[in-house]
Amino acid sequence: MRSGRGTAVVCVLGVAACAVSVALVITVGQAGIGVADVWRVVVARLGGADAGLTPIREGIVWELRLPRALLAAVCGAGLGLCGAVLQSLLRNPLADPFVLGVSSGASTGAVSVVVLGVGGGALSLSAGAFAGAALSFALVLLLAHTSGGTTDRVLLSGIAAMQLFSALTSLIVFLSADAEQTRGVLFWLLGSLGSAGWGEVAVGCGALALALVVCLARAHALDAFAFGPEAAAALGVRVRRLRLTLLLVTALLTAVLVSSAGAIGFVGLVLPHAARALTGPAHRRLLPVTALLGAVFLVWVDTAARTLLAPRELPVGVATSLLGVPAFVLILHRGRRGRSTHDAAGAGL
């Protein structure tokens, strides 16, 4: 399915699968809600006839499950998109959105607000996480710039920032948090969509739409990166500007998603490889398909995380890691046996 028509079919099927998945997962749970009930609630909230459900059941659909399912879709799509861009931009098939240290910075910001009371109550956990993510990314850019600004320097700077902010997070929790705060912070750090609301959905959708437009507009330049930055420059690509723009876009999108849902790993690592198997390496086809696959994937993983161990809830980041680690090992072995992974991302490690 590497032709334009085949990719269009995949995109249409992906959109349909995403819509059906969101509708179905809302019915999963102990409240006994059907797809027809979901439709009636949505129509009623958009100005149609009364849904005919009790306020509690209507609230379960509109205030709890629907925003959670939509935020899961947005997070999955955004993380997948960031992973596809970074794997090409950094020419590393094992890169993912957290390679820039954004997740660790967001964790430090969130912990600073919850445990240390930074902001004096004026900052929410999400706002603190976003501020920490922005600080971490600024540090990565500074380190990369002062050390030469090459692709490998960006990657190494991200690893350094990730370790630094992870250590700061652990230090803050160790020195200042009580048992209750520690449990709450750790649950959030492992990834959780339980506090999803319409505000987070709106912000996430806006950030995702902006990032998708920017990345698609530079799809041909990303294709040129498959041959290396020198070859891309010879083809007329402004390498430094492209790299800075896309690093900034992916970092900001990751910061928005992490501030809403915590750290959810392996989505941005694994899903781009699955999408390449369907579309090939051309980014105009790869990016939207990766986003759709990520959306469907995380919607169902989050549903499994909240229901399989009910009444306890498994952090969605733990669930994605349990699924992602075997896929990660498979990618490593594929890269060792052949050139498929290297061809898809442009180069080897």
Image (cartoon, rainbow, N blue to C red):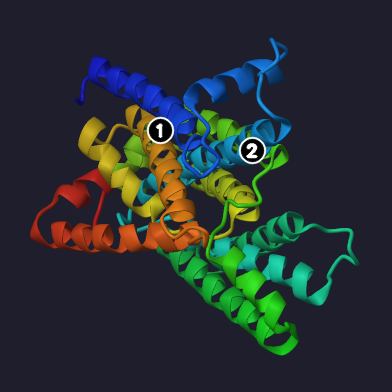
Q: In terms of secondary structure, where does tag 1 sit?
A: helix
Q: Which residue is mark 2?
A: 60
Residue at 48% x, 61% y: name it: 314
- Spot occupied by residue 244 in the image (x, y as percentages of width and height): 55, 48
Instruction: Tell me if I can see residue 346 in this picture.
Output: yes
Residue under the image location 53 percent in, 47 percent down = 250
The furthest residue to the top = 49
Q: Quadrant of the N terminus?
A: top left
Q: Position of residue 90 (x, y in %)?
A: 39, 54
Query: In this rendering, would 336 be left or right of 288?
Result: left
- Residue 295: percent from left, percent from top: 44, 38
Q: Is residue 182 above or below residue 336?
A: below
Residue beneath the point at 64% across and 62% down: 106
Residue 247 image point, x, y percent: 53, 49
Residue positioned most to the bottom: 175
Judge whether 170 appears above or below 243 on screen.
below
Q: Which mark is residue 292?
A: 1
- Is residue 227 visible in the rendered structure shown here? no
Question: For the residue carrying disc 1, how many other residues have a C-alpha within 10 Å: few (<14), some (14-19), or many (20+)?
Answer: many
| Quadrant including the C terminus | bottom left
